[in-house]
Amino acid sequence: MLTKKKVWRFIILACIIVPIAVFITKVDFVVVFQELQKIGPRFLVILLITFIAYLLGTVGWWVCLGKERRCVSLLQLFGIRQVGETVGLYNPSSIVGGDVLKNELLKPYRITGSVASESIVVSRVTAVLSQLLLLIISLLWLSLTASNVLPLLWRYGLFVLIALLLAIKGVFFYFLYQQRGIGRTVPQNMSNLWWRMRKTVRDLALQAQCFCRDNNTLFWWSYFLFFLHWLVGSMEFYVILYFLGYDILWIQGVLLDMGVILIKSVGAFIPGQLGIEELGNKVVLASIGIQGVAVWVTVSILRRARQVCWILIGIVCYIFIRKSDTTNVLKYGSPVR
């Protein structure tokens, strides 16, 4: 007889597996294989770049664990992060579901629950803030180099976007470093969805603020490592276009990658951002004057092929992240509460 707990586990696994399965079935592996044949062994360079980027992201999270990072090795944390990021990318709950799963997968390593959740929140904050910095830098470069080419309306829109991003970043840091803490009052009406969301956001914000105040050096190390994470990851576009015979600047590769990420965030609830990422690739390539359909399709296929490889790696990581028996990964509780 199925218990309530088993039913929830089945639902959770279905929510994780089904979107990934849908994504894989939508990929034309014949076309992928043909394009990979053209690139040949150089495709391994693309995988190496993403591996280095993911490793930097792992170290950026690892430092946020503070003294308790000795409880988990960098390799184990890499596996946990890879599983969480894979679920976050191909699950309708997006990064929320992935981060909750990371927290669950940390439990067997005897890391304090508050430290685990705090490290996940802070690493997500430093990742977003460093990404905003890189996006601002790439947009500033675009505004300075292409100001005479862009229409007047686009130029004004670009300056407004840069100003908006700078304002958001400034508000973030003002909040993190303000002396007055966030109110800890627990909402009275916990049955109300709005109040529960406010409490959740308040708790997460308080964790980030407390960490930034008490562990300022670790916060900035994480910020720097995530900046490198985005910087190295953006080289994927540069390398792919170089292999296809396009001589672009490195900063253009950064602009392309940041642009796609910005567009993908609109469709974050779509598993794997199917269709959204392809549209993003087309838009950003056109922004630097590359409008050939063949190039756009090839770039999209190669990026999807890289994602498929990391899905498989994520599955392997899920099998080996536990110190002993992987099948007991849910014995500490359901990933969704």
Image: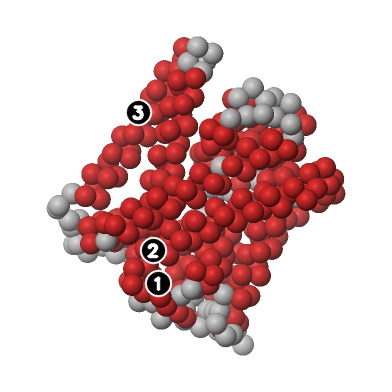
Q: Position of residue 183 (x, y in %)?
A: 18, 57
* Label 1 or label 2, whichever comes before in sequence order: 2
Q: Could one spot residue 193 in this view of the protein?
A: no
User: Do the CB atoms of the residues marked 1 and 2 lie less than 8 Å apart?
Assistant: yes
Looking at the rendered image, the disc whose residue lies closer to the viewer, 3 or 1, is 1
Marker disc for residue 270:
none
Earlier sequence position, callout 2 versus callout 3: 2
Q: Residues within 10 Å of mark 2 (few under 14, many from 20)?
A: many
Secondary structure at badge 3 equals: helix
Q: Quadrant of the N terminus?
A: bottom right
Which mark is on residue 69?
1
Please state the horizontal and vertical placement of residue 233, each as a whole percent of the image. Answer: 56, 47
- Asked which secondary structure carries label 2, the reply is helix
* Residue at (47, 81) in percent of width and height: 108
Circle 3 residue: 163
Specify whether 206 is left or right of 285. left
Residue type indicated by callout 3 = Ala
The residue drawn where x is 70% and y is 55% is 308
Q: Are marks 2 and 3 in contact (CB under 8 Å)?
A: no
Q: Amino acid at mark 1?
A: Arg
Q: Quadrant of residue 107?
A: bottom left
Sequence-earlier tag: 3 or 1: 1
Quickly name the residue at label 2.
63
- Which residue is nearer to you in this view: 276 or 146? 146
Point 71% across, 33% down: residue: 296
